[in-house]
Amino acid sequence: MDVGRVLLCLFSVLVSEKFLVAAFSQSLDSDFTFTLPAGRKECFFQTMKKDASLEIEYQVLDGAGLDVDFSLFSPTGHVLYSDHRKSDGVHTVETEDGDYMFCFDNSFSAVSEKIIFFELLMDNMEQEGEEPEDWKEYVHGTDMLDMKLEDIMDTINSVKARLGKSLQIQTVLKAFEARDRNLQESNYDRVNMWSMTNLLVMMLVTGVQVYLIRALFDDKRHTHM
């Protein structure tokens, strides 16, 4: 293999590595779990760009009733979506420039706090003026290589998209598992409490019945001389 071909391969690998780091340096998916106290309302903000897509998925993992009020507001303050006392929901909106606000409201509950999970999925969030194909102008003579960088990038992007989707599904399944586990533990405690209550009532009834039966056979007659 000649020196020119080796140098071209090394240059191609370096350029590919440079742009791969730039492509994967910012994550556009995020999730968060927090505790919403009773009688409180919590709001979050997400900055979006025009012609992008924002998807919000939420679930109530724990708390009495497993429900919460949810609202999504546009940058101008208009209500885009509003859910009343739901345990989960998914909403997607085509965005414009500005800060989107979404709120979780537990003010209807005076006693029970809620544990809430939500996930944000953002698409088409490239920076203005960013050219995804700019890396090609740095590479010349790729026809001399057995495998083109464009094919490598397409394959890597496909794998990245599938891995991102798999991670999203795993995160949602973990949230469902946490909610089901909390529900089962709550039912377990409730069954134990009512079992003990029934046991105490049965013991009390048994004692009363024994006392009444003994009272029936108790000879209360007195002999007078």
Image (cartoon, rainbow, N blue to C red):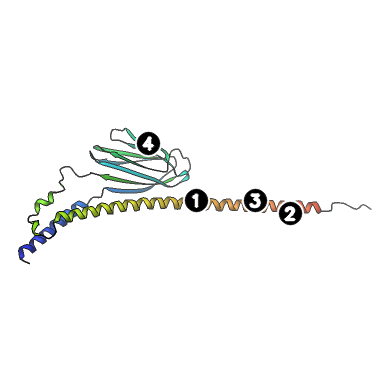
Q: Are marks 4 and 1 in contact (CB under 8 Å)?
A: no
**What is the distance, in whole Å, between disc 4 and disc 3 at their CAs?**
46 Å
Which of the marked residues, 3 or 2, is nearer the chain's N terminus? 3
Tell me the distance, in whole angstroms, between the alpha carbons under discs 3 and 2. Answer: 14 Å
Looking at marks 3 and 1 on the same chain, the residue that comes earlier in the sequence is marked by: 1
Q: Categorize mark 3 by other alpha carbons within 10 Å: few (<14), some (14-19), many (20+).
A: few
Separation of residues labelled 4 and 2 (CA atoms): 60 Å
Residue 149, compared with residue 50, is above or below; it is: below
Residue hosting label 1: 186
Helix, strand or loop at mark 4: strand
Residue furthest bottom in the image: 1
| Label 4: how many Cα within 10 Å (few below 14, some 14–19, many 20+) | some
| Disc on res. 82 | 4
Work out whether residue 52 or residue 102 is closer to the camera in this orientation and state it.
Answer: 52
Q: Of the residues shown, which amino acid type is indicated by label 2? A: Val
- Regarding mark 1 in the picture, which secondary structure is present there? helix
> Please, what secondary structure does the residue beneath circle 2 have?
helix
Residue occupying the point 76% across, 51% down: 212
Residue 40 x, y percent position in the rendering: 41, 40
Q: CA distance from mark 3 to mark 1?
A: 23 Å
Give coordinates of residue 139: x percent, y percent.
9, 54
Looking at the image, residue 107 sits to the left or right of residue 222; the answer is left
- The Cα atoms of the two marked residues, 4 and 1, are separated by 28 Å
The secondary structure type at the circle numbered 3 is: helix
* CB atoms of marks 4 and 2 within 8 Å: no
Residue at left offset 11%, top offset 51%: 136
Q: CB of mark 2 within 8 Å of CB of mark 1?
A: no
Q: Which residue is mark 2?
A: 210
Q: Tell me the amino acid under the disc marked 1.
A: Ser
